[in-house]
Image: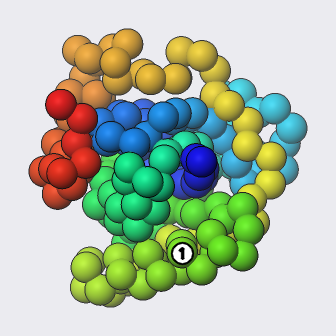
Amino acid sequence: MTTTFILAGGCFWCLDAAYRALDGVSEVVSGYIGGHVANPSYEAVCTGTTGHAEAVSVTFDPDVIPADVILDAFFTMHDPRQLNRQGADVGTQYRSAMFPLDDAQLELFTAARDRADEMWGGGVVTTMERADTFYPAEEYHQDFFAKNPGQGYCLAVAVPKVNKVRARFAEYARS
């Protein structure tokens, strides 16, 4: 039986690439959540006026990779102390947020955020937001890193995040 988490932590290309590097992850979908416009486009989300976050829907098998590893990887691959940004990506669409689908996920997410606050020495600003409609991003955003391995942003930003996750969670890294 699989589980799905919806998480936002900066550009979805980075989250997508890092989660695809882990065993037990069967699907990663980049998309938009948390806004007030139906079926937003990438261009609209980039304006910061739709309220959406760039996020990923991560589906995994908890018998292969524990839920806590998925969540701890999330807090490893981005800096949850940065409000409405990740590095040079600035705006509410790049916020650190978790979108629990039920009370059990809210409990798991809260515990993970508490662990992250300790790991980062305090100051975590990751929000818990009600999961509403998740809109998959345009096809060219799906598995972007694999499709564009030489793209400058991927090389400068995504590769270090993927490497950090692979190193910290080596026992779960795909070979």
The residue to which callout 1 is attached is 108
Question: What's the residue at 24%, 35% (across, down)?
Answer: 174
Q: Establish if 117 lies above or below 175.
A: below
Q: Establish if 35 lies above or below 118.
A: above
Circle 1 SS class: helix
Q: Position of residue 44 (x, y in %)?
A: 70, 33
- Whether residue 64 is visible here, answered yes or no, is yes
* Kind of residue sitting beneath label 1: Leu
- Occupied quadrant, residue 30: top right
Question: What's the residue at 65%, 61% (across, down)?
Answer: 99
Q: Position of residue 127 (x, y in %)?
A: 58, 72
Location of the C terminus by quadrant is top left
Q: Is residue 38 left or right of residue 84?
A: right
Q: Position of residue 154 (x, y in %)?
A: 28, 28
Tell me the colour scheme of the image: rainbow
Q: Is residue 23 left or right of residue 9?
A: left
| 55 or 106: nearer the viewer | 106
